[in-house]
Amino acid sequence: MIDPTKLSLSDQLVYVKQGILTRKDYYNLRLDGIAGPGFEDAVTRCKAAHGLMARPYIGPLTDSLISAANEPNITPWGDLEIEPPVSESEVTTPPMLREARKHLGTREIPGSRSNPIIMGWASDLKAADALAWYPDDDIAWCGLFHAILALRCHPDLEMPPNVLSARNWGGRDVPRGVNKSAAVEPGWGQEGPAPQRGDSLHLGSTGIMWRTSRHRSWHGHIGIIDAQNTTHVRMIGGNQSNSVSRAWYPRGRFLGTRIVPGQTYIPAPTLPTGSSATMT
């Protein structure tokens, strides 16, 4: 059990906000005063639900929103000790999942303008020779988002030709549809469990889907898996409703998953379809 009086002042403030976010059903990890990915994710979702910019930064408006002054039943420390079963340090969170959570809420700009954040990702990928062309964020960017996660977290893994095409990330292990450009490529990372066969999936692994047609189209989608159940899979992905967001997809829409060789994975949490809750 954490003794909050032994934490630094800044960590005590995080501890209090963790407790408030727990009461509001946004945070479900152990109260420890650490502003880790789980805390940042809770802050981001709380802000989005209250019409604020969805990012982990705590400014004056957010500070007021999750202030102890608004929680009259909270007494010093005691009422805050709500102990969920796991803490940040007890869960292995794959790097790409941690990185993806940081960008929840990033949205393309309709019309002739483009979000400079998304275009910055494209510039970084071009500088790394992983991308040759990306003119604006009207071009589907789920593959672009996955590529920037891969570049930042696993730069040693070779990316597929044309990172913008989701199916290319699966290489020859997924149906190519009408696009044969990567039919002989090994794909990014290595093949993981198959959602379409009902396999249990890894938290933080890469999911690859078909769109339009499994075999008669090159269209696809790609994201990071963060929840599952027997019929659906939830992913954090780019260009989901024109933003980085969480979305649920039927298992039958998947072509497969990819994992990072040598990385330790735990099963993705089982949640009801449509749930926005997080377990890590």
Image (tube, helix red, strand yellow):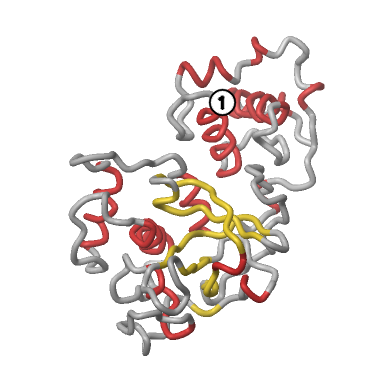
Residue 253 horizontal/vertical position (percent): 55, 67
Image position of 94 (left or right of 159): right
Residue 257 horizontal/vertical position (percent): 54, 72
* Residue at 48 percent of width and 26 percent of height: 58
Examine the rendered structure and indicate whether residue 129 appears above or below residue 46. Answer: below
Pointer 1 residue = 10
The answer to which image quadrant residue 23 occupies is top right
Image position of 149 (left or right of 248): left
Q: Amino acid at mark 1?
A: Ser
* Residue at 55 percent of width and 40 percent of height: 41
Residue 197 horizontal/vertical position (percent): 66, 76
The answer to which image quadrant residue 146 occupies is bottom left
Q: Secondary structure at mark 1?
A: helix
Examine the rendered structure and indicate whether residue 223 appears above or below residue 36. Answer: below
Residue 72 horizontal/vertical position (percent): 73, 9
Frontmost residue, 36 versus 190: 190
The answer to which image quadrant residue 34 occupies is top right
Examine the rendered structure and indicate whether residue 276 appears above or below residue 161. Answer: above
* Residue at 63 percent of width and 66 percent of height: 202
Image position of 166 (left or right of 193): left
* Residue at 66 percent of width and 30 percent of height: 18
Answer few, some or many: residues within 10 Å of disc 1's Cα (few below 14, many 20 plus, some between 14 and 19). few
